[in-house]
């Protein structure tokens, strides 16, 4: 099964990366989002990826230009879906939004099309019926900065056809990823089953004023030898993803944490993608001399 024509739904941080990575490896990509404003933001993200590929992968400008040329951007769902071999959904982590998207998409797709969700938190069985083709639907989860952290976790649900799992495995390898297949559904896959409790614990220490973000990171880095702490990781993932998760919780601590994250987002502290989150980029404090000893002069972003 050849998967050449790809519709990526959602031009956020990961959606843009998935589109660029696919196009960089020769796929024909249509990036769909709901508005011209959303597509303008996606275009900015795509433009920032080219120099990253040139730096990290030593790609030539000719190769990154060719990748950009293979990506079309549109707000027309029907046009994006009309001849897709594969749809990769990377839209907000909200049940209502995802369900409505699949219900609208289902009648627009040709019979051949496979659908993969990049959801970080939901199981594919949650939305299989809404897709109208549950046997051709599974989860395909990428880690942020996918051209460097090039793992894909493939997770079917009980109704996923084994041939679809195999086709997504092959597609992942074709676009330069290292795929792994999970034996059964698991909330958070492997990566987020480990990562989310780690990040949640850090957020709750920060959100209840036990310590500031830099102190929490320093303790973790000193004690484990890790190259960055939880808030350095959060900046890579992006604060909007964190907010989506915490804003759906109802306990008092999570509500307080969500409010503090939202305040940072409102001030433009989105993480690495905006150049500032809990650190400023491209030279974050945790990479500077004196950070671990507490002697760095750079202060925690307010």
Image (cartoon, rainbow, N blue to C red):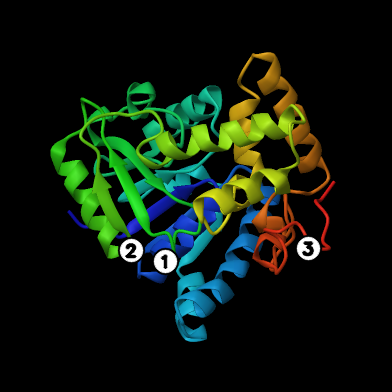
Q: Which mark is residue 296?
A: 3
Nearest to N terminus: mark 2 or mark 1: 1
The reply to whether residue 237 is in sight is: no
Provide the residue designation for mark 1. Answer: 23
Q: Which mark is residue 175?
A: 2
Nearest to N terminus: mark 1 or mark 3: 1
Q: Is residue 134 left or right of residue 6?
A: left
Q: Please state which of the two labelled residues, at mark 2 or mark 1, is closer to the viewer.
A: 2
Nearest to N terminus: mark 2 or mark 3: 2
Mark 1 in CB contact with mark 3 (< 8 angstroms): no
Residue at 65% across / 51% down in the picture?
218
Depth check: give the residue in front, 54 or 197. 197
Query: Whole-percent x and y of residue 24?
Result: 41, 70
Residue at 64% across / 14% down in the picture?
250
Depth check: give the residue in front, 12 or 142. 142
**Whole-number angstrom distance, CA of label 2 to CA of label 3:** 41 Å
Q: Is residue 162 above or below residue 149?
A: above
**Whole-number angstrom distance, CA of label 1 to CA of label 3:** 41 Å
Mark 2 packing: few (<14 Cα in 10 Å), some, or many (20+)? some
Q: Secondary structure at mark 1?
A: helix
Residue at 23% across / 30% down in the picture?
184
Q: Secondary structure at mark 3?
A: loop
């Amino acid at each position: 099964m050849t998967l050449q024509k790809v519709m990526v739904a959602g031009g956020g941080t990961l959606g843009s990366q998935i589109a660029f990575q696919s196009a960089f490896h020769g796929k024909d990509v249509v990036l769909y989002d709901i508005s011209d404003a959303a597509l303008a933001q996606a275009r900015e993200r795509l433009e920032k990826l080219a120099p990253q590929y040139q730096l990290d992968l030593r790609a030539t400008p000719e190769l990154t230009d060719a990748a950009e040329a293979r990506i079309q951007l549109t707000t027309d769902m029907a046009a994006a879906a009309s001849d897709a071999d594969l749809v990769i959904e990377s839209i907000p982590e909200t049940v209502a939004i995802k369900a409505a998207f699949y219900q609208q998409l289902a009648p627009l797709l040709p019979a051949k099309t496979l659908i993969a969700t990049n959801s970080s938190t939901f199981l594919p069985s949650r939305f299989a019926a809404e897709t109208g083709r549950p046997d051709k639907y599974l989860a395909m989860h990428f880690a942020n900065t996918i051209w460097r952290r090039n793992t894909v976790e493939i997770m079917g649900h009980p109704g996923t056809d084994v041939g679809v799992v195999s086709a997504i495995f092959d597609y992942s390898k074709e676009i330069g990823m290292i795929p792994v297949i999970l034996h059964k559904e698991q909330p958070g896959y492997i990566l987020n089953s480990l990562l989310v409790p780690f990040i949640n614990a850090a957020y709750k220490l920060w959100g209840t004023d036990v310590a500031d973000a830099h102190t929490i990171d320093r303790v973790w880095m000193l004690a484990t030898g890790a190259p960055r702490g939880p808030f350095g990781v959060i900046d890579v993932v992006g604060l909007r993803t964190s907010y989506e998760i915490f804003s759906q919780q109802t306990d008092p601590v999570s509500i307080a944490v969500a409010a503090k994250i939202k305040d940072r987002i409102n001030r433009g502290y989105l993480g690495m993608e905006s150049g500032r989150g809990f650190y400023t980029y491209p030279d974050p404090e945790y990479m500077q001399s004196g950070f671990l000893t507490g002697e760095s002069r750079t202060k925690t972003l307010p």
